Image (spheres, rainbow, N blue to C red):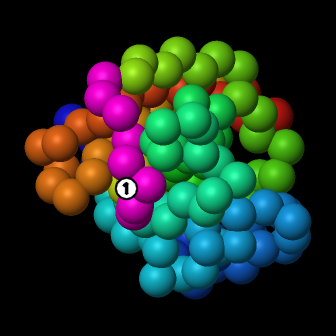
């Protein structure tokens, strides 16, 4: 269950922040239409590229973990504003199924949002939210 907290950034503002803060990052994640924002929740739609593939034509582990981390960062920033120096302090990822080379969604839910730490549940899925391919618990340190 997500924290019942109104977002302070919309998809356009979040997209603009990512484009400015990470100009060489995953450009397709920067687009505002890739974000869905609701109280305590952010969904990112991500289309992997060939650089993120591993042998066998599946999306690599580092690519999956990077998407989970970005989703956690996005849901935190959507609720506290553009705090560029918020940092990952812990990321625990479980690989549940192979991730096919097609669109992947990351649903990030705020579990706890404190003054110094935020904890987020992230689920990666394909085709249907019930088809979870990976799950992460991510903790961020928020500068004070």
The residue drawn where x is 63% and y is 58% is 50
Name the spot of residue 74 as percent of width and height, x first.
Answer: 57, 54
Horizontal side, residue 52 vs residue 114: left or right: right
Pick the front one: 9 or 44:
44
Check the image and report above or below for 120 versus 137: below
Horizontal side, residue 26 vs residue 132: left or right: right
- Which residue was labeled with disc 1? 105
Quarter of the image where the N terminus is located: top left
Q: Is residue 120 visible?
A: yes
Q: Is residue 98 magenta?
A: yes
Label 1, residues with CA under 10 Å away: few <14, some 14-19, many ≥20: many
Horizontal side, residue 30 vs residue 112: left or right: right
Check the image and report above or below for 33 versus 63: below
Q: Can residue 113 be seen in this view?
A: no
The residue drawn where x is 70% and y is 63% is 26
Magenta region:
96-103
């Amino acid at each position: 269950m997500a924290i019942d907290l109104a977002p302070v950034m919309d998809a356009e503002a979040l997209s603009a922040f990512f484009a400015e803060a990470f100009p060489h990052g995953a450009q397709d994640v920067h687009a505002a239409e890739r974000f869905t924002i609701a109280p305590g929740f952010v969904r990112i739609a991500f289309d992997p590229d060939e650089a993120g593939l591993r042998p066998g034509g599946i999306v690599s582990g580092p690519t999956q973990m990077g998407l989970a981390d970005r989703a956690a960062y996005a849901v935190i920033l959507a609720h506290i504003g553009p705090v560029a120096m918020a940092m990952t302090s812990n990321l625990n990822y479980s690989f549940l199924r192979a991730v096919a080379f097609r669109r992947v969604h990351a649903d990030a839910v705020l579990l706890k949002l404190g003054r110094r730490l935020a904890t987020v549940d992230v689920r990666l899925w394909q085709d249907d939210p019930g088809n979870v391919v990976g799950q992460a618990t991510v903790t961020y340190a928020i500068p004070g």
